[in-house]
Amino acid sequence: MKKKLIVFLSLLSLSIGTYAQEVDSTQLAIDAIEKSLVYTTGIIELEEGNAKLNVPKGFRYLDRKQSIYVLTELWGNPEDKSVLGMLVPEDKGVMGDQSWVFTITYDNMGYVKDDDAEDIDYDELLKEQQKEILEGNPERVKAGYEPVQFIGWAAAPFYNKDKKVLHWAKEIKFGEQEVNTLNYNLRILGRKGIYIINAIASMNELPEVKANIDKVLGSVQFKEGSKYADFDSNVDEVAAWTIGGLVAGKVLAKVGFLAVILKFWKLIAIAVAGGGAAVWRFFTGRKKNDENAPKLENQ
């Protein structure tokens, strides 16, 4: 009996050692990816919308190419090339458990009228969106993604008529994940379109995200001639959407479901990229030859 116990403990020790080595190699892969990213600060000329971004204090900026790489390859989102860049808190990377970001997109939908801002029934809007998201789940699952539930408002919709900015937040649940995702939406209205800034985080980061909303909203400035007040009804197009339409998510056909992110897949994805197949199986319980396991390309 004693001999069997010694053999068992030896095998257990070997197994733990192998697992530790794979975890170490995974961390090295994570560190290597973090170091490969090139962040910038200061004033950024945004590629679309005729505006500049003054990177706010406490943040760093990733350009379009790198942002798409993070969102798609590392975090498991459907590809959306409309993303212009992202703001990343300077004390966090994109691969940690506490990582969160603001993505920046522009939609040249036209001038958004705000006449209906005070007449919207947000409780009814919540019910409609919850129903629409559930109805869209079969298509998401078919595409290889987890089903989604819209739990409720994490922050009630609010429109600042003076500053022409709109923001609201959704609490989203992916599949059976224990921690829900935070989808904090910011919209900055201009003469010919809107900037779409979305905070992608977990609900645990809600206080931290909310503390930075005003700072981020003030970081994007339309240039002269493109501001909301520069609208000319004789030459400019009026958008098909109003304030209520923006909150209702009717622009998701253009923007995609990028803001609602599978951020908690990122460490598992890196485990695969770093050769940590055992780590992947530890997290998921999948067999090595499971055809449904996510695969990374171009790593």
Image (tube, grey):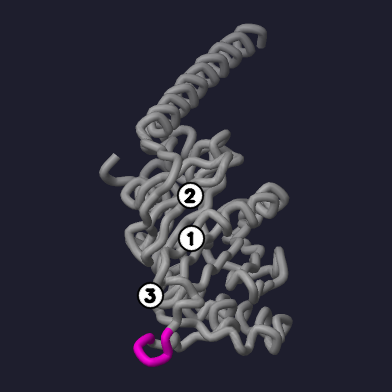
The reply, left or right, for residue 12 in relation to residue 230 is: right
Q: Secondary structure at mark 2?
A: strand
Residue sitting at x 48%, y 44%:
266
Q: Where are the magenta residues, as a range?
A: 232-236
Task: Out of 2 and 191, give the one closest to the viewer.
Answer: 191
* Residue at which label 2 appears: 54
How far apart marks 3 and 1 lie (CA) works out to 15 Å
Say if 237 sits above or below 261 in the image: below
Crowd around label 2: few <14 · some 14–19 · many ≥20 (10 Å): some
Disc 2 marks a residue whose amino acid type is Asn
Disc 3 marks a residue whose amino acid type is Asn
Tag 1 near tag 2, CB within 8 Å: yes
Residue 246 within the segment the image draws in magenta: no
How far apart marks 1 and 2 lie (CA) works out to 8 Å
Residue at the extreme bottom: 234
Where's residue 227, x and y in %?
A: 46, 71
- Disc 3 vs disc 1: which is toward the camera? 1
For the question of whether residue 253 can be seen, the reply is no
* Residue at which label 1 appears: 221
Please report whichever mark, 2 or 3, sits nearer to the chain's N-terminal start: 2
Disc 1 marks a residue whose amino acid type is Gln
Q: Secondary structure at mark 3?
A: loop
Task: Out of 49 and 224, give the one closest to the viewer.
Answer: 224
Q: Secondary structure at mark 1?
A: strand
Q: Quadrant of the C terminus?
A: top left
